[in-house]
């Protein structure tokens, strides 16, 4: 695909908008944790997102023939959401996204056949090692939060791979609507059982709708457009700046400050992705 092709430019614009909205939405969502916890916040996000997307795209009019990748895509989507929210309950958003980003970075690197990409693997591993918690430091990162962010990364990798397969079966909007519905059916009951009547607080529901729109309905639709216009590897590479976007959103919205070493670690993860991008196009 030519570097400046129309599809490539559209994909970049879609991904930039998706990154800004999804990380801003995550920062806002974290403010709901004291009221409905990560489970209730995830239920809001997936439930309202599924409702919005189904109303817009009416997926029942376009029944797919191959359901398996769609179901796996939806389960990866649900797993990615709830494990990420559990993670950022314990660690800053910017660090959570940097650790979660190991998923799409792995997709990009394992798709490559070049030996030089081992250098970028080393950069990524070093960045992750810098982020790993010092268990002897009471002020260090929560190890459970770190582990949950890595699990979210594995779910993110599945979301990319199966999202690409699912997107080839039907239109992007229909795919996201069905996938989000599968995710909601899997996660919302868990949130309802966990948080109960707290989810019916009318002062929280408008914020839940906003989170569903900003964090899922809009960005995942934009990402699906991008996935349909580029290979999975290219998608993973262009997402490389998301950890920095997340850290900035966490600072502006939540006042989360990162140390110099944590910023360096995030920079190394981004460098690994950008380096992989450059070498893959040579």
Image: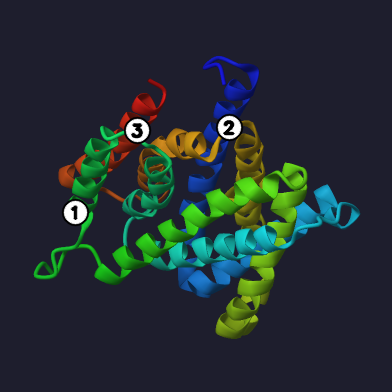
Which numbered disc, 2 or 3, marks the residue that appears first in the sequence? 2
Q: Nearer the viewer, residue 56 or 74?
A: 74
Q: In the image, residue 137 lies at what x, y percent?
A: 11, 67
- Measure the alpha-carbon separation of dots 3 and 1: 19 Å
Q: Nearer the viewer, mark 2 or mark 1?
A: 2
- Judge the density around disc 2: few (<14), some (14-19), many (≥20) Cα neighbours within 10 Å: some
Residue 151 in the figure: left or right of residue 156: left
* Quarter holding residue 83: bottom left
Residue topped by disc 2: 230
Work out whether 190 lies above or below 162: below
Q: Is residue 228 visible?
A: yes
Question: Which of the numbered marks, if any, corresponds to residue 276?
Answer: 3
**Residue at (76% x, 54% y) in the render:** 52
Q: In the image, residue 80 lies at what x, y percent?
A: 50, 61
Work out whether 13 lies above or below 205: above
Look at the numbered disc 1 and give the secondary structure of its residue: helix
Question: Which of the numbered marks, if any, corresponds to residue 129?
Answer: 1
Count of number-bearing discs:
3
Quadrant in the picture for the N terminus: top right
- Judge the density around disc 1: few (<14), some (14-19), many (≥20) Cα neighbours within 10 Å: few
């Amino acid at each position: 695909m030519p570097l400046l092709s129309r599809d490539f430019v559209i994909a970049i614009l879609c991904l930039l908008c998706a990154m800004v909205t999804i990380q801003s939405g995550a920062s806002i969502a974290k403010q709901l944790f004291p009221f409905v916890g990560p489970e209730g916040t995830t239920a809001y996000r997936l439930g309202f997102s599924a409702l919005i997307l189904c109303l817009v795209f009416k997926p029942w009019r376009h029944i797919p023939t191959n359901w398996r990748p769609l179901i796996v895509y939806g389960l990866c989507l649900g797993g990615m959401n709830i494990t990420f929210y559990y993670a950022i309950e314990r660690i800053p958003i910017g660090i959570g996204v940097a650790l979660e980003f190991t998923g799409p970075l792995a997709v990009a690197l394992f798709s490559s056949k070049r030996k030089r990409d081992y250098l970028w693997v080393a950069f990524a591993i070093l960045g992750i090692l810098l982020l790993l918690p010092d268990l002897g430091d009471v002020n260090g990162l929560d190890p459970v939060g770190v582990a949950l962010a890595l699990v979210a990364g594995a779910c993110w990798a599945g979301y990319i791979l199966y999202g690409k397969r699912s997107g080839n079966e039907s239109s992007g909007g229909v795919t996201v609507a069905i996938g989000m519905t599968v995710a909601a059916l899997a996660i919302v009951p868990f949130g309802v059982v966990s948080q109960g009547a707290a989810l019916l607080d009318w002062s929280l529901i408008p914020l839940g709708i906003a989170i569903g729109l900003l964090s899922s309905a809009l960005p995942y639709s934009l990402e699906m457009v991008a996935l349909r216009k580029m290979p999975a590897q290219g998608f993973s590479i262009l997402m490389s700046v998301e950890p920095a976007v997340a850290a900035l959103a966490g600072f502006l919205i939540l006042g989360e400050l990162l140390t110099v070493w944590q910023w360096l670690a995030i920079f190394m993860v981004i460098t690994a992705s950008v380096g992989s991008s450059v070498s893959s196009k040579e």
